[in-house]
Amino acid sequence: MTTSQPPLQTPVEHLDVLIVGAGISGIGAGRYLTTELPAKSFAILEARGASGGTWDLFRYPGIRSDSDLSTFGYEFKPWRDRQSIADAPKILAYLRETATENGLDERIRYHHRVLAVSWSSADARWTVDVERTDTGEQLRLTAGWVFCAGGYYRYDEGFTPVFEGRDRFRGEIVHPQFWPEDLDLTGKRVVVVGSGATAVTIVPAIAGTAAHVTMLQRTPTYVLPVPREDPIAARLRRWFGDERAHALVRRKNIAQQRAIYRFAQKHPKAARKAIRWVNTKQLPAGFDVDTHFNPPYDPWDQRLCAVPNGDLFRAIREGQADVVTDRIATFDETGIRLASGGHLDADVIVTATGLSVQAFGGVAITVDGEPVTLSDSVAYKGMMLSGVPNLAFAIGYTNSSWTLKIGLLCEHFVRLLRHMDERGLDTARPVLADPGMPTRPFLDFAAGYIQRAVAQLPRQGDRMPWLTSMDYSDDVKLLRADSVVDPELRLTSSRDRLPRPAAAVGA
Ligand SMILES: Cc1cc2nc3c(=O)[nH]c(=O)nc-3n(C[C@H](O)[C@H](O)[C@H](O)COP(=O)(O)OP(=O)(O)OC[C@H]3O[C@@H](n4cnc5c(N)ncnc54)[C@H](O)[C@@H]3O)c2cc1C
């Protein structure tokens, strides 16, 4: 009897493109590849057991977008629902429908976490180390390109500052990223710590169930009511049908977002006054708007919080919720003692204190044996890294819909790949012509979670193509209209780098 021996070397699977993450960005990238470059082999590796990323992970009450879905949704797929500011389950259904319609269900490999990618210039390919999150098995494959769509925060932990006395609290403490499915707030006194998008979503969503909700904030945020449904979009859909209406509403909303952002940047005092006026009209007479809704920074230095149909203000008007602006001295057995001396009684404390930022899905990057330190690299066109070949990443806008940028950079990515294929090139490496160029943080955004993470992110330069634009029309020019050929993007073929065969020398 003969015993069969395992092969000495199992063949390693090779893909033209490896996409990391099956959230809105990774699914979008997959769709651009299948439609624009159908001959390319690719897979989407997803660490979790489900697609959708953010829109599947978060389960807190009221979870919704704060962008309108005509711009947050894909350019290629109309958003048909009446809700313009949409609930997470609707967004998730839309993403999964996109995956199915584009044959991506078969491309997504669940429970596959990408741990590390190492580039070899000699082979012009990445070696990718993967861990199966369900079995712990370690896998290896190779890829010509890596497209990193792993989002910008950690999935396994949120951000919670150290709260003195936390252990003394006898009630329940909940972080919105890990909302317990069976949490019953009926008749409970709830304190929501935080003032960002998550806090302003949760407060009105639980206001009808809890005995009382208090939003406890250290610093106020700009909060603006927005219509949950867009009557103009509904009318355009009736007149022109879904496809045409989607394009029109998208254009309208992009223009609107840009106009508001630009106005706020140019005329911060007037913007502040206008927001204050809107807030005052929504809040009960005598409400202390200046303490609770008048931030120390200018509008849009941090992301504005949208509240659909003013639901937060309604909860305050109806006496179901209130806002306290103060500092936490300590948690105690029955709630939170404030620096001002007051006390908030609580049965449940929700720590809506933010995300723990993580760039590039935590993937370790090595180029020809040298580890890449993200903070030493400079972002090229906001989508590649200086000195790092064949790696693109999806980081979207922080001042408007994230995805508006992702769509444009996917277009640029497929154009670049097509250009290289047509010329037999296999390596694209951004190289700084001026290594002394001054640099600054990749994201100029004052939000706490970005500031905490600046050192983990790449940097940007002071000139194109090293600037990371946050402006849609600048990016339309750079990423959609301009050529992919650029003196600071070195396009080569590994064949040209091979030593020439002896017979050919001197031929
Ligand atoms: C509650 C909430 C609401 C938001 N609302 C808006 C909004 O209204 N408008 C807006 O513009 N932005 C919003 N954002 C920001 C939002 O996260 C992005 O707009 C968008 O959803 C990000 O999509 P993404 O696909 O890039 O990343 P994610 O949604 O984070 O998806 C990343 C995926 O990659 C996977 N992954 C990560 N690392 C690895 C790895 N190493 N290997 C394999 N898989 C990996 C993750 O498991 C995940 O599935 C919101 C964020 C949050 C948290």
Image (cartoon, rainbow, N blue to C red):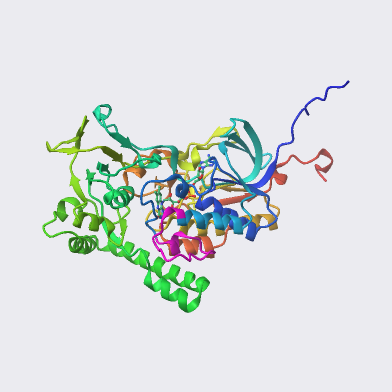
Which residue corresponds to the image point at 40% horizontal and 63% vertical from the top-left?
84
When the figure is inspected, residue 2 is found, relative to residue 407, above or below; the finding is: above
In x, y percent, where is residue 240? 49, 77
Which residue is situated farthest in the front direction here? 187
Q: In this image, 245 relative to 3: left or right?
A: left
Q: Is residue 78 magenta?
A: yes
Q: Which quarter of the image is occupied by the N terminus?
A: top right
Residue 109: quadrant of the picture: top right
Q: In this image, 131 relative to 404: left or right?
A: right
Which residue corresponds to the image point at 46% horizontal and 76% vertical from the top-left?
238
Residue 414 visible in image: no
Q: In front: 103, or 426?
A: 103
In x, y percent, where is residue 210? 26, 46
Q: In this image, 184 relative to 421: left or right?
A: left
When the figure is inspected, residue 467 is found, relative to residue 154, above or below; the finding is: below
Which residue is situated farthest in the bottom direction here? 239
Q: In front: 119, or 432?
A: 119
In x, y percent, where is residue 40? 68, 53
Which residue is situated farthest in the top direction here? 1
> What secondary structure characterizes most of the magenta part?
loop
- The magenta region covers 68-89
